[in-house]
């Protein structure tokens, strides 16, 4: 009896253990309940960037969000939230390439690597894994399809700048749907020759709206290679509308338009470039035809660019662009129980925040409440007026367009502080004086000069002061950063850098609760990637 007593629980324990193992095996393998994964990355979208959208939606006197609710509010209500650390291997801060590599593969990467772990070995990305499982796979970005974030899901190169080689990897792997910009990396060198047949053919194919110039170093036509794999090629919004099956869509020479341009042209009948939302919508239409499910990565990539420029008004429009895209994703996935939607950022950019100041102090006000009877309400500092949010929204052109298109296109002798002030004052609600424009255009001997460096190689650069080391994209970005400093007090906005910060980013996960509950903690992006991989393994 004694012995039996001991044996029975032992057998029970063994049975229990066996069933436990098999059920947890089941949970992590085939029965996660996830058929489709939509992974949305806001490049540079730290908590402060989301905060700007939330402040605008809730507090702007003329908020374009009628019920003050954003897609982020809905995601948080429906699903789970966590935060995630983003650092790359052996580094405090990450760039987009290492971060995307880590988010795509679950392995630590070195700075600026694409689809390689820090030891230099090829990673297996979630997109590749999904493809192997017979799922359909897709990449969407409002930058270029060869840019770091989409690249790290489907290419393996030692550096993010090798975009021709990245394009080669993309057509080799041939994800079912690729929609973005970046035609220049897919066409042969010869296409740059305006009298060549290929130049003429490409002009015709693309509807004449895309600049035909190659960044390629050889005569290989990657468009022909992907066509031979059964992909259709599309270059305009109309061509995209009717396409079926597998598709490569390249809608511009380099990046797609910034968020302000996109919204400015949205209702124009002449528009040929689809919006990020339209690209996402079409991708989901095409990919969701597969019985085995799909993996789609959507990047809102220009939040980062606006943040590098410290261009708050444009960044708000970039946040509205990702929000609109998320609204569509939620409307598609919301009613389903088989789709995991994960939204995060690769890192924070710019060290952004609205801030209170000691300038323009508020005047005293009478309050009726009993605590203030006979007294006045007068805070010691200026905590920021709500109408600033409306004024940020009303910006008509991005800083990038103001400098690279309007100002730099002027004849050299007309590139004066006065004309710069005019352009800025015509396109933003935060005017500057000629004296301020002078400071933006002033240059000095480059304190960080590096002969032959892509960004630090110019002898004379804008004057950045003591924090200059954090503004390393000198001739590309620094005038914009200086403009941001000139309007900081009137915008109540502070930026701490022209590069990225280590600030942990938010993670939103919506889908089957037994899957999303794992995202409700402090993660590192490598763990986040492994959670995603686990759902389809
Ligand atoms: Mg990116
Ligand atoms: Zn960046």
Image (cartoon, rainbow, N blue to C red):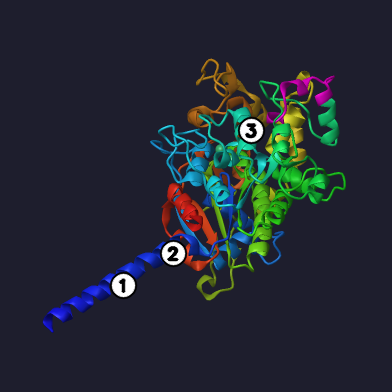
Q: Is residue 464 above or below residue 320?
A: above
Can the viewer see residue 354? no
Residue pushed farthest left?
2
**Mark pair 2, 3: CA separation:** 38 Å
Q: Is residue 190 magenta?
A: yes
For label 3, the residue is: 167
Residue pushed farthest right?
269
Residue at disc 3, secondary structure: helix
What segment carries the magenta color? 183-198
Q: Quadrant of the N terminus?
A: bottom left
The residue lying toward the viewer, choosing from 169 and 19, is 19
Which quarter of the frame holds ligand 2?
A: top right
For label 1, the residue is: 16
Residue 44 image position (x, y, % from top left):
56, 44
Whether tag 2 and tag 3 are in contact, CB under 8 A, the answer is no
Q: Residues within 10 Å of mark 3 (few under 14, many from 20)?
A: many
């Amino acid at each position: 009896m004694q012995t039996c007593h001991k044996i029975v629980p032992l057998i029970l324990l063994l049975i229990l253990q066996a069933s436990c193992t098999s059920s947890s095996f089941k949970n992590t393998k085939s029965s996660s309940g996830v058929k489709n994964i939509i992974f949305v990355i806001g490049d540079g979208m730290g908590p402060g960037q989301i905060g700007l959208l939330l402040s605008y939606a809730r507090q702007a006197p003329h908020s374009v969000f009628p019920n003050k609710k954003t897609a982020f509010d809905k995601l948080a209500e429906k699903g789970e939230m966590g935060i995630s650390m983003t650092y790359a291997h052996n580094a405090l801060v990450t760039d987009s390439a290492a971060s995307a590599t880590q988010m795509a593969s679950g392995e630590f990467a070195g700075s600026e690597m694409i689809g390689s772990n820090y030891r230099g070995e090829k990673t297996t990305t979630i997109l590749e894994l999904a493809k192997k499982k017979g799922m359909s796979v897709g990449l969407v970005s409002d930058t270029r399809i060869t840019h770091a974030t989409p690249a790290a899901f489907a290419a393996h190169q030692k550096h993010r700048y090798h975009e021709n080689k990245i394009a080669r990897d993309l057509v080799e792997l041939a994800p079912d749907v690729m929609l973005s910009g970046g035609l220049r990396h897919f066409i042969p060198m010869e296409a740059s020759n305006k009298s060549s047949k290929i130049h003429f053919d490409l002009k015709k194919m693309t509807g004449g709206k895309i600049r035909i110039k190659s960044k390629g170093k050889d005569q290989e036509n990657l468009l022909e290679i992907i066509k031979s794999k059964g992909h259709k090629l599309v270059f305009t919004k109309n061509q995209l509308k009717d396409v079926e099956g597998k598709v490569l869509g390249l809608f511009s020479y380099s990046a797609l338009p910034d968020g302000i341009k996109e919204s400015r042209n949205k209702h124009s009948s002449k528009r040929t470039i689809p919006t990020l939302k339209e690209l996402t919508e079409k991708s989901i239409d095409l990919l969701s035809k597969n019985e085995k499910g799909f993996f789609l990565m959507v990047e809102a990539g220009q939040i980062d660019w606006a943040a590098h420029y410290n261009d708050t008004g444009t960044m708000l429009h970039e946040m509205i662009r990702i929000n609109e895209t998320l609204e569509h994703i939620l409307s598609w996935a919301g009613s389903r129980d088989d789709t995991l939607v994960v939204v995060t950022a690769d890192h924070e950019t710019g060290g952004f925040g609205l801030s209170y100041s000691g300038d323009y102090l508020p005047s005293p006000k009478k309050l009726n409440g009993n605590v203030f009877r006979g007294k006045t309400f007068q805070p010691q500092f200026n905590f920021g007026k709500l109408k600033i949010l409306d004024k940020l929204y009303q910006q008509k052109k991005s800083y990038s367009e103001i400098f690279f298109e309007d100002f730099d296109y002027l004849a050299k002798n007309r590139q004066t502080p006065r004309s710069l002030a005019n352009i800025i004052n015509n396109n933003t609600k935060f005017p500057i004086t000629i004296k301020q424009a002078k400071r933006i255009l002033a240059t000095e001997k480059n304190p960080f000069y590096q002969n032959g460096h892509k960004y630090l190689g110019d002898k004379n650069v804008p004057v950045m002061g003591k924090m200059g080391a954090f503004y390393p994209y000198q001739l590309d970005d620094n005038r914009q950063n200086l403009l941001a400093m000139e309007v900081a007090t009137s915008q109540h906005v502070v930026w701490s850098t022209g590069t990225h910060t280590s600030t942990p980013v938010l993670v939103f996960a919506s889908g089957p609760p037994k899957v999303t509950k794992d995202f409700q903690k402090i993660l590192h992006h490598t763990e986040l990637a492994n959670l995603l991989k686990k759902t389809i393994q």
